[in-house]
Every structure is written in C-alpha cells, then in structure tokens.
C-alpha cells in the first residue's frame, strides 16, 4: 500500500477499535433463535439503554440483576413439572426398600404406573411424595442423585434428556445479558438443591445465583457430623408473593430485568416494574402446539391468565413462542 | 544509553512485567496493620497456594469463597452487640408514640436509662425489644433508619461512629482477598437488613454477599402494595449450626476461607475445615484490654471457649489482637 492508503487503513482500524470499545457488547447475531420483531427489539433496546454510559437510563453493572423463573421459562414444564418426573423416578427406585410406603395410595398407583390416579391425588399426598424423594439425603448425596437422574432419564414425549428440553432462545438471552455485565439469577418454585445440580452446566447460572423452594436442613448425619441433611419439612415455598421476598433475602437488590411465564411470576414482575429507572418485564407465552405445547389460561401447569392481561395492558414484553422463537429447543446432539 | 545497555534495560523491563503478571497479586504492603509473624504468614501463604495455577492447592476463582462473621470479627461487639445499641435508640425514639409499650418493664428501664435492669431482662424480653425496633418497617424505610442511626450515633466509650469501630486489619484482609479473586461474604447472627445498610460502604461487601438472621417478610403495606415489610416473627437465627446451613442456602459452595471470633462460629469453622483441598480457618482472639477489650471464655458477649481449644489443637490461625495487630481501629477522621 502507498503511505496515504496505509494511513487511511490504520485510521479506519483505529476508528473501528474505538467504536467497538464504546459500543454496547452486542451484535445482530447475539440472539439468532429470536425472530426479528418487537419482542427481540425491546430486549436489545433495553440492554443498549442501560449499558450506555452517557444515556439517562444507564445502570451501573452492580445493579444489572436479571432474574428468571425456571419451569416454563428456561425449560419446559409439560406435560408435568420435571421435578415431579424426578420425584416419581426416585420413589420407584426407593420403594422396594421402603415397605411402609406401599400403604400410601399415591405410591401404589405410581408403582403400577397408574399416572392418572397419581395426578388425581390430593396436593397433600403429592407433596408427601416430593418430601419422600428429597428428605433424608445429605446435600452432597442429593446432588449426585439428581445428576444421575439428569444423565439417565428421558422426557416421555421427546425422549430427550430433560436438560435438553431447555429453551434455546432463553439460553441465548442469558448469555447476551451476561456479555453486557448482567448477573443472571433463577428465582423458581422448584427445589433449590434440585436445580443447583444442573443450573451451572446447563444455564451458566452458578449455585449462589439460584433461588428456589427449600426444605429445612440440619447439620450432621450418622455417618458425618458435618454433613448438611435435607429434613422432611418445607421451609420456603417460592411462588407468588414469596418470590419478591426471596429475591430480597438472597440478593438485596430489585432486579432490572425479570422473565417469567405464569401467574406465579406475577408478583415478581409487578415488583420489578415498581422499581425506579429502566425495568424490563417479560413473559414467555406458550402458543405453539406443534413445536412444543400451547397452554395458558386453562392450564393446571403453569397457568398464565392475570399476568398475561397485565403484561398486555402495561406493555411488558410477551415472547410468543410461535411468533417470536425461530427455534424452541437446542438441536439434538448426534 | 548505548545500544547494549538499552537492550539490557528493555529486557529487564520485560522480565519484570512477566514476573509481575505471573506472581500472585500481593505485596508486602497489602496487610500493613498486621504485625509480621505466623498468623500473617499463614494468611499470605494460603492465598499464594490457592492462586498459584501450577500448584497442587490451586483453587479456581469461582470457588474462592471467603466468609466472615461480623460482630467481634469485622467490628467490635463490646460492651454490647451494636445492633442492641441500635435497638435501644430506636425504642427510645418510638416510645412516645407507643403508650402501650410503657407497660413493659424492659422499656420502662430503658426510658429511665437503667441499663443494668435492661441487660438483666430475660432473653425473651430483650428479644421482644429487637422485634419492636425492626418489625413493621418496609425494607426500604428500615434501610434509611439504620443509615440515619449510623450517621448520628456514637459508641458510648470511644465516641466514634459505630461504623468506625471496625477492625482495620480485617478491612485490609478482605481487600487483599478480593484483589486475589476471592468473593467476601458476611455470615453473621446480626440482622440481614441491619447489616446491608452499611456493609457495602464500610466493608466492600455488596448486599447479595450478606447472610444474616432475619425476620419473616410479607409483600404489601397500606401505602404500597409492593413494599416488602418486616414482620414481628423471627425466621432465621443465624448462629452455631445454622451458619453452615445458611451458607449452603445462600451460596451453595463451602467456603475455603472462614474467619470468626466466638463459639457461635465453631460449627462454620469445623464445616469449612471438613472440605477437601486447602482450607483456611481463623479466629480473632480479643486479648488487648488497652487498645480494645480483652475477653474470651468468661464473656457473655462473644464467648470464645471450645472454638479456641479446637483452633489451637488443629492449627487454625488465631489472630491475637495484642500480638498480631499493629493497629486495631482505623485512624480517626479529622
């Protein structure tokens, strides 16, 4: 190159480098599984606004807290909450060694495969199954038990591992937020220790950023005086009004970005919206019966009714699966 | 410079830069308030071991969790837990508007300044005072109330703000750990919302890294349907066996570095020690009656007895205030 062109070339490089260093960290490819449209635009526009230092909506990195529900938001919850599939599998595995469980109608139904009868059980009986599957384990043992289940179990419909029934667009969204200085948290009604067994590997969410329901714990087992043991007593049911409370206890900051999918997330979304400055509220609306399952107002699992009305009235983002997601689940591994 | 000397000079610069980039981030000046000796050496040696990538004790940054007790470890707890001074001040402020409180013996004693009688109250009556001072406030109001108290109140003996009754060597220790990729947490029996009002400014510990005792919360007040309100009911008493449990719930990782000062921290220290790989357990032993207060086995506040025996038997670090701390409190502001 002659010297004038060389100067121009280096000047362009310098300009590009400068622009790259001050532009928010995103590219048109950061969210490839999201179709172009208002929902995707609202996400990108929000992130640009809170990361632009000269803008009025700038938020310092320490306050860039993003909170996600899990069931129905990050992974599927159909035909049942996946933690129930874990529970049923665990009861089946343990029942032979627990003759006293055979008396329980829900267990009997489970063992003969009468899932209709199992799901018709009272909430109290179902809940007792969950306790039976969780309690008595040290947190370390329970972590291994869940990891084994993750490795070996398959979704009844797709035959994929449950941890592949995650929503690809939401994985991209979380990675995009983290690339822009956000801390991504889960705030779920699911069990804390259950989710921690896979959240880091599957979602990039470390254990200290998982908030969930939990049982009481005690310190010390027969084998190990310093093991933490899951007790057969609920401590926190992390749903509805409890979600903002749990977020306050765990984080002590109000999120600026919150995504849910059901009425159980309504309080958390309204609480986020009540904060000052720029706030993003999003709902996943399951509208795609072909690629996934379509459900909302009438569903027993993940019912979405009042929160959807509120979202539409207030202009919260609604990620309509059929309309907004080019891809639902990650590609199958060969 | 001639060209040979120039080459040597630049080679030395390059060598220095290379060494600086691979050496652990510390200097002899990182802990200036610690006297040279075995305690300081054990801290520095531990940090070097876990940050040296080629070493057998290397710990990845995500696992570099350091947990500190607060009362008696990061700030003084003499002559009383400072949160009690806050409680008493709050009761005095509110009592005129709460005629029904006047019936209570502990309140009456407080209002006439009979501190002997106050401290002779039953644990239950004292605890009721704490509830009275905390409950009913939104978390946002309570945060302001504590900040006001911090700004306006003075330690009865030193006449300094309570947030200046912090231990300078521990501030340096936490900064040094953070410079080496550690996340510093508090795990205290003190109230979560009380500590969050000053922990970031005073200790560099953000709200999501504060673990404490807490009351139940509910969502919604008369004035604000989305305010989080402190309820007059204890939820977590974060002491003894509860500390490892709280750490598990909040972090989901076992710390590699834990510092306490009393028997209330013994379980947390033993739990830390039971982890695999390099672990650091430390106690502050208050031995300096001149610069601070000397107390341990006989003290009602911050009793240190069994944990000290265990520390000495097992070779945990014991920071003897008289011997190991060149400076106790930060210099007075002019």
Image (cartoon, coloured by chain):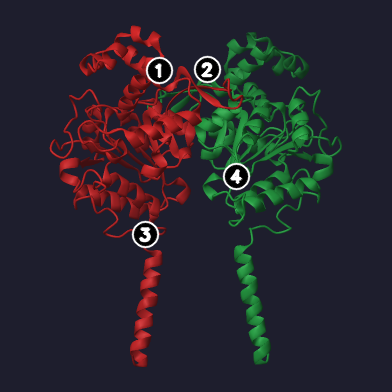
Chain colours: A red, B green
> Label 3 neighbourhood size at 10 Å, few (<14), some (14-19), many (20+)?
some
Residue that extends furthest to the top in the rendered view of this protein? A103
> Label 2 neighbourhood size at 10 Å, few (<14), some (14-19), many (20+)?
few
Ranked by sequence position, the earlier of labels 2 and 4 is 4
Give me the C-alpha separation between circle 1 and circle 2.
29 Å
Residue holding disc 3: A24
Disc number at residue B201?
4
Disc 4: which chain? B
Residue holding disc 2: B233
User: Can you tell which of label 4 and label 1 is closer to the viewer?
Assistant: 1
Residue B31 relative to residue A266: left or right: right
Q: Label 3's element?
A: loop
Name the residue at 48% across, 28% down: B138
User: Can you tell which of label 3 and label 4 is closer to the viewer?
Assistant: 3
Name the residue at 68% across, 87% down: B5
Ranked by sequence position, the earlier of labels 3 and 1 is 3
Q: Label 1's element?
A: helix
Give me the C-alpha separation between circle 4 and circle 1.
45 Å
């Amino acid at each position: 190159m002659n010297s004038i062109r060389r100067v121009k070339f280096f000047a362009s490089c310098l300009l590009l480098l400068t622009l790259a260093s001050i532009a928010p960290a995103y590219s048109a490819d950061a969210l490839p599984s999201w179709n172009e449209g208002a929902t995707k635009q609202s996400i990108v526009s929000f992130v640009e606004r809170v990361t632009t230092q000269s803008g009025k909506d700038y938020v310092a990195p320490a306050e860039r807290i993003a909170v996600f529900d899990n069931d129905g938001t990050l992974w599927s919850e159909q035909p049942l909450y996946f933690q129930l599939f874990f529970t049923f599998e665990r009861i089946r595995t343990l029942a032979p060694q627990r003759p006293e469980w055979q008396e329980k109608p829900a267990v009997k139904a489970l063992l003969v495969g009468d899932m209709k009868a199992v799901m018709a059980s009272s909430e109290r009986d179902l809940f007792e199954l969950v306790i039976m599957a969780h309690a008595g384990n040290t947190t370390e043992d329970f972590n291994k038990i869940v990891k084994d289940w993750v490795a070996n179990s398959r979704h009844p419909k797709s035959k994929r591992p449950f941890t592949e029934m995650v929503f690809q667009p939401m994985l991209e969204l979380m990675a995009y937020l983290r690339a822009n200085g956000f801390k991504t948290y889960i705030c779920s009604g699911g069990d804390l220790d259950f989710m921690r067994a896979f959240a880091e590997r599957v979602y990039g969410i470390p254990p200290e950023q998982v908030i969930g329901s939990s049982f009481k714990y005690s310190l010390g087992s027969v084998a190990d005086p310093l093991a933490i043991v899951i007790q057969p007593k609920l401590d926190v049911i992390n749903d509805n009004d409890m979600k903002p409370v749990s977020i306050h206890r765990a984080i002590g900051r109000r999120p600026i970005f919150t995504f849910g999918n059901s009425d159980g997330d309504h309080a958390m979304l309204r609480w986020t919206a009540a904060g000052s400055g720029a706030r993003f509220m999003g709902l996943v609306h399951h509208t795609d019966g072909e690629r996934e399952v379509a459900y909302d107002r009438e569903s027993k699992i993940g019912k979405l009714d009042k929160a959807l009305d509120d979202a539409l009235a207030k202009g919260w983002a609604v990620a309509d699966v059929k309309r907004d997601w080019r891809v639902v689940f990650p590609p199958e591994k060969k």
